[in-house]
Image (cartoon, rainbow, N blue to C red):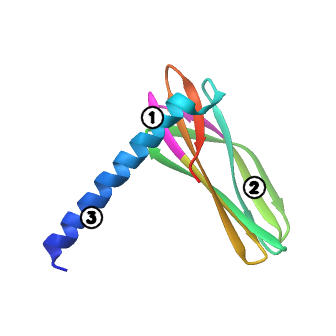
Amino acid sequence: MSEEETQTLNQDIEEQTKTYIADLVEKAVREGKEKSKFTLELSEWVTLGSAVSGWGTIVVLYGEVEKILLDSRYKYLMSVTKTYEIIPKTELVVIVYISASDFGGQLEYHTILYAFFKSAGWKSISVN
């Protein structure tokens, strides 16, 4: 595959991704669960060393937010959890919360899209 073909393919993938995210945001507006009017509380976590291990992470796809650390918990050799208050700094914010749990070798992913609109507040929709 030539460099030009690779660039064209990458541009097509990027456009399809933007369209997919825009469709999910639109669906969140119409059908999403109302979470809160202004702030959103989410946790990032990692669990290791037990029969069940996993992680959860916050990814800001669009807009700007301020993450204020509310709580941080560490269980020796077991888990780390950090809970944040998410405050939107722009009129539109899109966040993807991705988590995965490993139950004895079977990794299960969960993805939730959170969308903030100044007029509607935070709404969420499962992406799985």
Q: Amino acid at mark 1?
A: Glu
Work out whether mark 1 precedes mark 2 in sequence or the reverse, and give the earlier one: 1
Mark 3 or mark 1: name the one nearer the start of the chain: 3
Q: Position of residue 29 (x, y in %)?
A: 51, 30
Left or right: 14, with 93 as reference point? left
Q: CA distance from mark 2 to mark 3?
A: 36 Å
Residue where numbered disc 3 is placed: 10
Instruction: Please give left or right for residue 11 compared with residue 112 in the image.
Output: left
Residue hosting label 2: 81
Q: Where does the magenta region start and end?
A: 85-95
For badge 2, the amino acid type reads: Thr
Of the residues under marks 2 and 3, which one precedes in the sequence? Answer: 3
Q: Residue at x 59, y 54 (%)?
A: 128
Q: Secondary structure at mark 2?
A: strand
| Total numbered badges shown on the rendered structure | 3
Q: Nearer the viewer, mark 2 or mark 3?
A: 3
Residue 26 is marked as: 1
Q: Which numbered disc, 1 or 2, marks the residue closer to the eye?
A: 1
Q: Nearer the viewer, residue 9 or 31?
A: 31
> What residue lies at 43% left-to-right and 38% top-to-bottom?
63
